[in-house]
Image: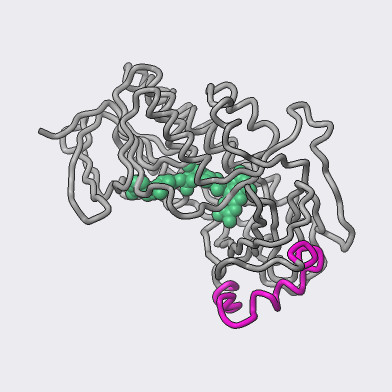
């Protein structure tokens, strides 16, 4: 007999775990399906101060407090000129932010969803879904050793991250604003940590560095996919050579040692377009809206949209079909606002007028604004 659920939430990152938590607390039968066991490191570790309110509202603040996150006192940037600009959280109404261990953070959220009654299937990937009878999805699963399985659900939440794997199977497409990719290297050693995130612009992209609990520093170089290919940062001393262009970031890692080769992560800005795709499903988190890591808002946005998608799907199952449109309109407005902020911030950097990376930021943003 095939297992039956009200909702299958696919992906247990911050968005999916939050959607599953909200739905399980409302009494729905929820399966939360996660292809990993959080065994690999995940990109994105800085939580801005408003995260506190969000985590408290979800009732996970106490669990969060046990994770050993490091305080984030603010941001420093070298952007638009050679001077360091500092924005401290000291006067922020919610106080400081945090640098979190993403494996532990995501696992904590998923186990909170389990405590609320969601059935969490770790090490299981959703590989197929279809709805031959309009009110019931048939979902194909594959386990870590290749074993196949199936389940049925009345609704689906796609929380698979930037790939939006499920939504795209169902006919949705991504409106891409760029092809940003982050190359990340973790450093260990005598860290002189001050709890700040550092952003430093360079000729072919920008650098980001931040503490990672308990005692590491992550350094990322953000640029477009084709520029990354030509830079070949995994070869020889190319990483160190490029890093020399960013003196403040370089100073931060002085005396430390990289603990692995650069790992690459897609960081595209995009908005998912439903294209009239039918059936009871919604996307949330990066699957619905992907934002530039420059904004440090991806995790908060994932939790917020996970909460919104959970509530909307719950209402949909209770017969309120208008909620999906309302949810999508809120996300459309959010994306438009985000794109305007992103354009404004990139426009501040004018030091490399012949750089492909920086010129693209101007032309692509202008083209996006002209799209419907
Ligand atoms: C380089 C980089 C740096 C970043 N820095 C920051 C930062 O400092 N602060 C910040 O707030 N944000 C940052 N972000 C953004 C942040 O990481 C994301 O916004 C956030 O992880 C989105 O959460 P999510 O739950 O939507 O997706 P994800 O975290 O991507 O989770 C998706 C989950 O779905 C699972 N999955 C995928 N496909 C399937 C499938 N078929 N079946 C089952 N499971 C599946 C995956 O294993 C994963 O667990 C950064 C992103 C990048 C790329």
Location of residue 150 with respect to 242 vertically, above or below: above
Range of the magenta residues?
227-253
On the image, the x and y values in percent for residue 289 come to 52, 44
Which residue occupies 70% across, 34% down?
49
Outermost residue on the front side: it is: 190
On the image, the x and y values in percent for residue 266 come to 52, 59
Q: Quadrant of the N terminus?
A: top left
Q: Nearer the viewer, residue 276 or 104?
A: 104
| Apparent side of residue 372 relative to residue 253 in the rendered image (left or right) | left
| Apparent side of residue 77 relative to residue 36 in the rendered image (left or right) | right
Outermost residue on the left side: it is: 1
Q: Is residue 313 visible?
A: yes
Dominant secondary-structure state across the stretch colored magenta: helix
Location of residue 236 with respect to 40 vertically, above or below: below
On the image, the x and y values in percent for residue 119 come to 31, 31
Q: Quadrant of residue 8?
A: top left
Outermost residue on the bottom side: it is: 236
Q: Is residue 132 magenta?
A: no
Which residue occupies 69% across, 53% down?
210
């Amino acid at each position: 007999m095939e297992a039956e659920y009200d909702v299958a939430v696919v992906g247990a990152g911050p968005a999916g775990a939050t959607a599953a938590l909200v739905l399980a607390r409302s009494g729905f039968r929820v399966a939360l399906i996660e292809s990993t066991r959080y065994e690999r490191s995940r990109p994105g570790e800085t939580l801005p101060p408003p995260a506190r309110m969000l985590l408290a509202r979800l009732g996970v603040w106490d669990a969060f407090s046990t994770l050993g996150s490091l305080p984030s006192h603010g941001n420093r940037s070298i952007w638009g000129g050679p001077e360091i600009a500092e924005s401290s959280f000291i006067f922020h109404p919610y106080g400081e932010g945090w640098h979190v261990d993403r494996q532990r953070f995501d696992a904590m959220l998923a186990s909170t969803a389990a405590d609320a009654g969601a059935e969490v299937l770790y090490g299981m990937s959703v590989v197929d879904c279809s709805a031959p009878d309009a009110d019931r999805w048939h979902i194909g699963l594959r386990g870590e050793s290749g074993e196949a399985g199936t389940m049925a659900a009345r609704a689906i939440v796609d929380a698979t991250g930037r790939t939006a794997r499920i939504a795209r199977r169902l006919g949705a497409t991504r409106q891409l604003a760029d092809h940003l990719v982050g190359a990340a290297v973790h450093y260990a050693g005598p860290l002189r940590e001050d709890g700040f995130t550092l952003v430093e612009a360079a000729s072919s992209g920008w650098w980001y560095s931040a503490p990672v609990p308990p005692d590491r520093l992550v350094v990322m170089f953000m640029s477009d996919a084709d520029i990354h290919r030509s830079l070949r940062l995994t070869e020889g001393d190319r990483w160190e050579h490029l890093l020399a262009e960013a003196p403040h970031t370089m100073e931060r890692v002085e005396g430390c040692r990289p603990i692995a080769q650069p790992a690459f992560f897609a960081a595209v800005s995009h908005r998912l377009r439903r294209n009239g795709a039918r059936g009871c499903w919604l996307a949330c988190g990066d699957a619905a809206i992907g934002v530039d890591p420059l904004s440090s808002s991806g995790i908060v946005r994932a939790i917020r949209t996970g909460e919104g998608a959970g509530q909307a799907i719950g209402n949909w199952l209770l017969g309120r079909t208008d909620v999906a449109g309302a949810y999508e309109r809120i996300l459309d407005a959010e994306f438009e606002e985000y794109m305007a902020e992103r354009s404004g911030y990139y426009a501040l950097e004018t030091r490399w007028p012949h750089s492909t990376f920086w010129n693209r930021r101007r032309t692509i943003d202008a083209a996006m604004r002209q799209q419907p």
